Amino acid sequence: MESLTHAPFIAAAYGIAFGVLAGLALRLFLKRRKIDQDLAALEAQQPRRRRRSDDA
Amino acid sequence: MSLVWRDIAVLSQGGRALALSCFFLVLAASLFPFAVGPDTKLLSAIAPGVHWLLALFLAVLHGERIFVEDEQDGSLEQLRALGFAEGSLMFSRIVAHWVIAFAPQIALTVVVDIFLGAGLASAGQHMLSLLIGTPALSCLAVLAAALTLGARQSSLLMIVIVFPLMIPPLIFGVSAAADSGSAALMLLGASSLISLVIAPLAGHFALKAALK
Amino acid sequence: MHRFANPARFGRLADRVSPVLWVLFGLSLALGLYLAFFGSPPDYQQGQSVRIMYVHVPSAMMTTGLYGFMALASATALIWRHPLAHMAARAAAPVGTAFCLITLATGSLWGRPMWGTWWEWDGRMTSVLIQLFLYFGYMAMWNAFSDRARAANAAAILALVGVGNLVIIRFSVEWWNTLHQPASILRAGGPTIDGSMLWPLAAMVLAASAYAGLMILKGMKIELKAVRLETLMENQAAPTTSYRLDLG
């Protein structure tokens, strides 16, 4: 009986904890992916840009 | 010493900064009766807290511009070139900040207490706690100003970093103002002394980085 | 000390340590959760809700521990001018903030069934709340400057001032609390730890530490990449502007 009344609080506590920690991991993952994309884009852009300035 | 006089003279802007402190205090104190009702019993009960919250706001109000103008017109660089160490620049600003922000507050304690319906006897206690505790607030405000010099949205940032650090003086100050024995006063004095050691030291490195 | 300052060397070290931490994290989390829910008895006073302790207490330890780590890394960065130390401190801040939020949320959820209140201005809870503000201030400092070196320096000084202040804050809040409510139920209710509760707690602390280690390493690698990105962009921006100037 008693454990029943406490169950939602326990579930919420563990839910919040794992939610926050998973959220942080996800945020870091997305951040890394974005930086990797930016780096790749920049490196791909490098030679093309030089060519354009040669045209000018 | 000449540096202290120079900073006070420059930062008080011919007394206008001091007048600002006075206006702010009287104005802000008169808002409390509107906020919590004109019940003088309640107002005098919260008077210690009111004094100290006003002190916190005064500290950041004047803290914001404590370095900015002198950094922009190059005066800070010049003072350094004249051989003043960063630590002494910090110290003189702390004194100037205290004179501009808190000397008016201590002088006006009685006026604020009359507004709040607190007796003259408690005004003395309030004044004593402000006198002993506000140096800590000046130290923290000037240190935060040095750290946030040149930052984006520096006034908001300053509030975010400085208010948590001001909680111990606030706690001790309110207790000392509410006259809960000499322990609070001693702890308040101790936090002022510690701040007077730490702030010039930490500010020394902060200014060095800011003026590089 | 500077052996690890080389980014490539750090990357290799991180790649070797990370798998170990992942395994440690998985094992200790599985063990901790099993022990927390099946291997330990309900508390005779608190009943089932004592199981919240196994996530609350490790989080609280991480909150304080990571702030200490941040301050240590900041001191290393300031004294030995170690570039990676700034990044370690910066990477630890969001992790500490996450654990701080969890500590507050689980404490609140623990308090509701136990003491009938979501929030009490109790000494410990108030200190954790202030610590959250300190974390926010630290992270705001990092984001407030366009110059990375300046931000790193200001944030490091703030972390050191903050850690000294944390001790004073703890003391002052505790003192303030005894002043206002001498017989708080929460203060009396530091639960006595039974042996059967110690093991799941230890396992969960280990899991939380491994998680924190993983996230810090990950965050540092991202920081290194961000620095590389910034320098690349600066190098690219420089010729463009001179080209435009030539046109004018």
Image: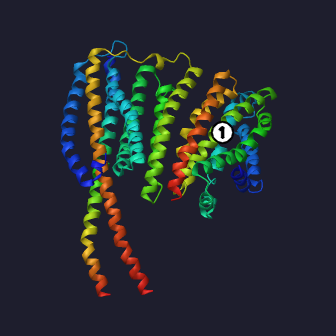
- Residue at 31 percent of width and 34 percent of height: A15
Q: Nearer the viewer, residue B37 or B208?
A: B208
At mark 1, the secondary structure is: helix
Q: Is residue B207 above or below residue C136?
A: below
User: In the rendering, at what x and y percent does residue B153 appear?
Assistant: 54, 56
Q: Image check: C127 left or right of B7?
A: left
Position of residue C49 measured from the top left corner of the image (x, y, whole percent)? 34, 22
Crowding near the residue tagged with mark 1, few <14, some 14–19, many ≥20 C-alpha atoms within 10 Å: many
- Residue at image coords 46%, 55%: C150
**Label 1 chain ID:** B
Instruction: Classify residue A47 by image quadrant.
Output: bottom left
Q: Is residue B154 left or right of residue C219?
A: right
The residue at which mark 1 appears reads as: B135
Residue nearest the viewer, comparing B94 with B111: B94
Q: Residue B111 in the image: x percent, y percent?
A: 80, 38
Side (left or right) of C230 relative to C206: right
- Is residue B177 visible to the viewer in this orientation of the structure? yes
Residue B137 position within the rendered picture, expressed as x and y whole percent measured from the top left: 63, 40
Visible residue check, residue C133: no
Between B56 and B50, which is closer to the camera in this rendering? B56
